[in-house]
């Protein structure tokens, strides 16, 4: 039999669409224990096993009957989620959101009084920092949850895949709602995010972080480092209510170790108090870096007398059409 087939007569190469169906059927984790770091078992039908459970079978500690039963009733489907844990070290925890580097901030993302991403100090000397958070899609459906370094993926996701230290969640074909890169032991990098929560939108990619308030005003930040120098610091805090731009400008977004307001009128705001990161995880287009790196840009929604057309260039200077940018 050719090497491209296993002893069961199945191809060793599984098509990508079949892999997604297998992940979904197993709840994105090991059918026995629910851990999310898995391999594909090439048995008809294919299923997922983590390295530990696979080793117990191949070394004769578990029977194949036990695996067959687990395959019929996957652990993750019963529990409603798969799970794993981040390797968080003892040094100050660093979280990247797009090109924004956040160090030692207790509250990273908050809407009203709900904290969406936070860091707790070690429980005792020599213990790791503790990262917690909740991530939603653009319809406010829960995708992913972190509880003190242990993370859980919802089985209701359209797809979730863990490859090479990267967790990718899609809500539909070619639409990545969340992508997190593990950076042990220093922290995590949120490479992509498209999240809505209580009238507030958080969008990030490899270039920038955008926070859109309830009134569609937007703050865009890239190439910055935010470092806390005291306890109780908040990096990004949004409010979900209020009818006027003035209220939005006074409270919709706070940046800095003391919650100092960075909002004002429209325009471009270099923030000298937040130094440029020493390094960035991944390549940046030279044109983008020269135009927007290290800046905070404020976009206040146009008034009726100064309306922007959907096909006009976006006023935030992204270089793309308004309908595909701040007007989306």
Image (cartoon, helix red, strand yellow):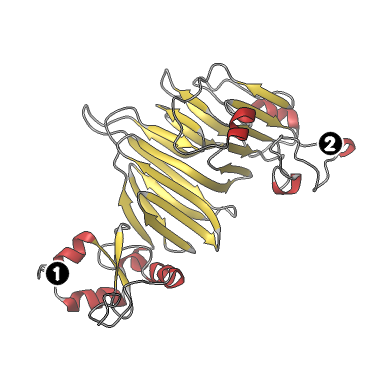
Residue carrying label 1: 58
- Residue neighbourhood size for the residue with mark 2, other residues' Cα within 10 Å, grouped as few (<14), some (14–19), many (≥20): few
Left or right side of 69 for 247? right
**Residue at x 16%, y 64% (from the top left corner):** 55
Residue 214: which numbered mark, if any? none
* Relative height, residue 262 to residue 6 (above, below): above
Quadrant containing the N terminus is bottom left
Dot 2: element: loop
Residue closest to the far right: 305
Give the x, y percent position of residue 37.
30, 57
Give the x, y percent position of residue 42.
29, 74
Dot 1: element: helix
Whether residue 269 is visible, yes or no, is yes
Q: Quadrant of residue 83?
A: bottom left
Q: Quadrant of residue 49?
A: bottom left
Residue carrying label 2: 303
Give the x, y percent position of residue 45.
33, 79
């Amino acid at each position: 039999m050719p090497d491209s087939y296993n002893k069961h007569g199945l191809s060793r190469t599984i098509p990508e669409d079949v892999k997604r169906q297998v992940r979904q059927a197993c709840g994105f984790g090991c059918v026995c224990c629910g851990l999310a770091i898995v391999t594909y078992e090439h048995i008809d039908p294919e299923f997922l096993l983590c390295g530990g459970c696979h080793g117990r079978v191949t070394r004769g500690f578990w029977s194949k009957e036990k695996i067959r039963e687990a395959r019929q009733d996957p652990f993750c489907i019963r529990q409603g989620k798969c799970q794993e844990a981040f390797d968080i070290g003892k040094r100050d925890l660093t979280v990247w959101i797009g090109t924004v580097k956040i160090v030692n901030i207790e509250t990273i993302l908050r809407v009203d009084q709900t904290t969406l991403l936070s860091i707790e100090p070690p429980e005792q000397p020599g213990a790791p920092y503790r990262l917690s958070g909740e991530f939603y899609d653009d319809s406010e459906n829960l995708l992913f949850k972190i509880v003190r370094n242990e993370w859980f993926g919802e089985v209701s996701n359209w797809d979730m895949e863990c490859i090479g230290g990267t967790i990718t969640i899609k809500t539909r074909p070619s639409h990545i709602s969340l992508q997190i890169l593990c950076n042990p032991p220093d922290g995590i990098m949120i490479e992509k995010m498209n999240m809505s929560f209580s009238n507030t939108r958080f969008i990030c990619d490899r270039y920038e972080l955008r926070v859109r308030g309830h009134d569609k005003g937007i703050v865009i930040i890239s190439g910055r480092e935010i470092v806390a120098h005291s306890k109780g610091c908040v990096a990004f805090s949004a409010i979900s209510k209020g009818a006027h731009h003035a209220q939005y400008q006074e409270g919709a977004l706070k940046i800095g170790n003391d919650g100092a307001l960075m909002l004002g009128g429209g325009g471009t705001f270099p923030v000298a108090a937040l130094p440029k990161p020493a390094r960035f995880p991944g390549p940046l287009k030279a044109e983008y870096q020269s135009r927007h790196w290290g800046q905070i840009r404020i976009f206040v929604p146009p008034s009726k007398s100064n309306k922007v057309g959907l096909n006009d260039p976006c006023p935030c200077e992204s270089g793309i059409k308004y309908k595909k940018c701040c007007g989306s």
